[in-house]
């Protein structure tokens, strides 16, 4: 008998999955517990600070299968059962993994088919863990009873229960519970455990509502609200928490307060707010401002309901329909897969100004958190971006792409979509997302070659390809990880021959240089020993080569502005920081003035923009050595020039110094690979 795959569970009932021998399912359950216990989040979209995943540093304790709910040991075979092979953790071949990396959506169907079995197994384990905690029921019946009720209901109303349990924020709730039960939660304002655990009764109520059953269901009242995930929210005029009874087509009573829920629960009544839905052909998604587990801050994962006004819902719907038209016109097949996977949009109501524009969480498969999008094309790009984070998160539930011992800590990398140095898992997430974003812009260029589309395509093609190439060289990748990145690179190779106007391509290359040089100036610091040796050699009229070869940078803690680079902002029309005088002169084509202003600006030891412009001017002037020094080693030129000024108390010809420091036969384009000592982060 071959191993059971997670995908084989897709057609099974809850009862059949729960009855599987625990020795069969335990490896997958253990993996799922670890995944939700350390779930990360992507932050990105069209924001200048880009995207990529951040991970929690916690790891949940899981002591094996242990005792069952009745106290008996279920670590071995149950009497009277046969023991099939263990569940394969992926059910995917390396060819499937390669196709996923290459963007083949038929391979993604295998990931999607694993979601049901994984969700049921994880929920079953969480209920088992809750059983060991006294007070998990509190004012409500125990979670075991809610789980048994959903198990029975699945036989009567399969689609209603399935859609309820696969609702994205159910995964987020499970993650919050796992971290809480393993004492690794960062919650700063956690409610009583029974209130979080009682959310399972809210899922029972949601499933009965979808099935049209008029059954009494006990439900938690959280701060005066009864939330039915994916259905709606009953809001009472109080902030008290407690327990109530829900019944479709009847009044929900809490203390002396009542809210009537109509049989047609999509209708609003006084106090009842149905969940709005964004609709487009073959693409529906809940616009969810109700779910209590939609917080973006790991320390504050819960949010009170905030029903959206009808006019705001319509505004979102209009943007959704227009963005969907862009996606369908670009690539109808890809749009259909995306539409089936993304089922919830969570408006980012607590986003700070100047922050990220979108987010996905690994434990909320199918949901995207969005700030109000600027236009339909921007929304379409963000949906492609976040869908590919979702796709990779689903794959990572099943197998490792990075060796587990290197998952946390280790080397840090430059990425074009974030201003901070990224660990390998985060960089890998970004490569997956921005390779897809590159494809999105390529499709748009073919259909409507606007200057914005051509520029973004050229920019992301260069950046995603270079970062993917560096990641592929890392020994920390597993075999599956190498195969996945090979798939990404094969998809990127198909874009190499796509042409854009030469002037646009040149501006895109300048934007690449702009971000990489400023990133190095913010984050890379040469060692004091190297700076001292080079300063002495320069002042003595010596050669730089020998000392320069022993230059190993380390990351510092500098930050960028969190805004688009000045060239990219100018070419896309997006908001960026106010250009400096040197930047304005460069954009106007006045190179002499740009050089003069840059030389004046770089006397400030914290200045970065002037160094970028000075390197760009040298590049256009055809000064090869100076260009290589300023663009590939800007942090070294800045550090040595500052040391020379301190030693001599006079200025230094920085362009001459840059030429002297240029690595022999080094690149003109700032490199992505920083060096093996990049893992040494300055504190």
Image (cartoon, grey):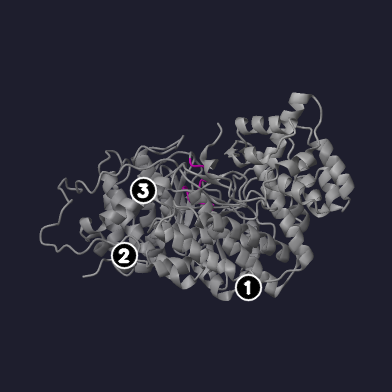
Is 290 covered by the magenta stretch? yes
Tags 3 and 1 in contact by the CB under 8 Å rule?
Answer: no
> Which mark is on residue 521?
none
**Tag on residue 34?**
3
Residue carrying label 1 = 330
The range drawn in magenta is 288-298
Q: Residue shown at 49%/71% (left/top)?
A: 104
The numbered mark, 3 or 1, whose residue comes first in the sequence reads 3
Pinpoint residue 614: horizontal percent, then vertical percent. 79, 45
Q: Which of 118 and 150 is in front in this view?
A: 118
Q: What residue is at 46 percent from the left and 53 percent from the top?
A: 362
Numbered badge on residue 154 = 2
- Reading the chain from its start, which is encountered first: label 2 or label 1? 2
Q: In the rendered image, which quarter is residue 437 located in?
A: bottom right
Q: Residues within 10 Å of mark 3 (few under 14, many from 20)?
A: many
Q: Which residue: 61% across, 42% down?
A: 549
Q: What element carries label 2?
A: helix
SS under mark 1: helix
The disc, 2 or 3, on the residue closer to the chain's N-terminal end is 3
């Amino acid at each position: 008998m071959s191993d059971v795959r997670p995908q084989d569970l897709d057609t099974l009932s809850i009862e059949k999955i729960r009855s599987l021998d625990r020795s069969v399912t335990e490896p997958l359950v253990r993996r799922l517990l670890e995944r939700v216990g350390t779930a990360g989040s992507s932050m990105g979209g069209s924001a200048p600070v880009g995207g990529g995943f951040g991970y929690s540093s916690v790891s949940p304790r899981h002591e094996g299968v242990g005792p069952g709910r009745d106290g008996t040991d279920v670590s071995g075979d149950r009497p009277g059962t046969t023991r099939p092979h263990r569940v394969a953790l992926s059910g995917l071949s390396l060819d499937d993994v390669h196709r996923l990396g290459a963007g083949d959506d038929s391979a993604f169907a295998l990931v999607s088919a694993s979601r049901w079995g994984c969700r049921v197994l994880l929920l079953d384990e969480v209920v088992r863990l809750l059983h060991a905690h006294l007070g998990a029921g509190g004012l409500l019946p125990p979670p075991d009873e809610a789980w048994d009720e959903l198990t029975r209901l699945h036989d009567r109303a399969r689609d209603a229960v399935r859609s309820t349990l696969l609702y994205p924020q159910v995964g987020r709730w499970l993650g919050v519970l796992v971290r809480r039960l393993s004492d690794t939660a960062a919650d700063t304002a956690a409610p009583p455990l029974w209130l979080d655990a009682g959310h399972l009764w809210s899922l029972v109520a949601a499933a009965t509502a979808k099935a049209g059953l008029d059954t009494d269901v006990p439900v938690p009242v959280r701060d005066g609200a009864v939330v039915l995930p994916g259905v709606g929210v009953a809001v009472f005029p109080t902030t008290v928490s407690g327990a109530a009874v829900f019944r479709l087509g009847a009044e929900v009573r809490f203390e002396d307060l009542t809210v009537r829920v109509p049989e047609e629960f999509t209708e609003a009544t006084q106090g009842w707010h149905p969940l709005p839905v964004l609709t487009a052909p073959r693409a529906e998604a809940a616009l969810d401002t109700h779910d209590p587990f939609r917080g973006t801050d790991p320390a504050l994962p819960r949010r009170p309901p905030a029903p959206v006004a009808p006019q705001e819902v319509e505004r979102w719907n209009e943007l959704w329909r227009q963005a969907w038209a862009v996606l369908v016109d670009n690539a109808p097949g890809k749009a259909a897969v995306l539409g089936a996977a993304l089922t919830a949009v969570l408006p980012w109501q607590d986003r700070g100004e100047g922050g990220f524009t979108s987010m996905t969480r690994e434990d909320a498969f199918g949901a995207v958190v969005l700030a109000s999008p600027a236009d339909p094309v921007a929304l379409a790009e963000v949906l492609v971006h976040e869908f590919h984070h979702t796709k990779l998160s689903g794959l990572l539930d099943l197998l490792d792409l990075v060796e587990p011992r290197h998952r946390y800590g280790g080397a840090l990398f430059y990425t074009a979509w974030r201003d901070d140095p990224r660990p390998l898992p985060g960089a890998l997430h970004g490569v997956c997302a921005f390779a897809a974003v590159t494809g999105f812009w390529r499709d748009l260029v073919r259909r409507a070659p606007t200057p914005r589309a051509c520029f973004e395509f050229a920019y992301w093609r260069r950046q995603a390809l270079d970062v993917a190439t560096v990641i592929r060289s890392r020994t920390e990748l597993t075999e599956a990880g190498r195969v996945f990145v090979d798939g990404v690179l094969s998809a990127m190779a198909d874009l190499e021959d796509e042409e854009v106007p030469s002037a646009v391509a040149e501006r895109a290359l300048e934007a690449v240089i702009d971000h990489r040089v400023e990133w190095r100036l913010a984050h890379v610091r040469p060692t004091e020993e190297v700076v001292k040796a080079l300063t002495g050699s320069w002042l003595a009229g010596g050669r730089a080569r020998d000392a320069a070869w022993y230059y190993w940078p380390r990351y510092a803690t500098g930050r960028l502005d969190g805004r688009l680079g000045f060239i990219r902002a100018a070419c896309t029309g997006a908001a960026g920081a106010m250009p400096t005088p040197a930047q304005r002169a460069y954009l106007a084509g006045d190179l002499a003035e740009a050089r003069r202003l840059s030389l004046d600006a770089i006397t400030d030891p914290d200045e970065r923009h002037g160094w970028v412009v000075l390197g760009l001017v040298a590049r256009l002037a055809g000064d090869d050595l100076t260009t290589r020094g300023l663009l590939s080693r800007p942090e070294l030129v800045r550090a040595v020039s500052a040391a020379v000024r301190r030693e001599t108390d006079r200025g230094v010809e920085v362009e001459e110094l840059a030429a002297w420091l240029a690595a022999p036969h080094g690149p003109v384009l700032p490199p992505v690979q920083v060096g093996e000592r990049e893992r040494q982060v300055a504190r």
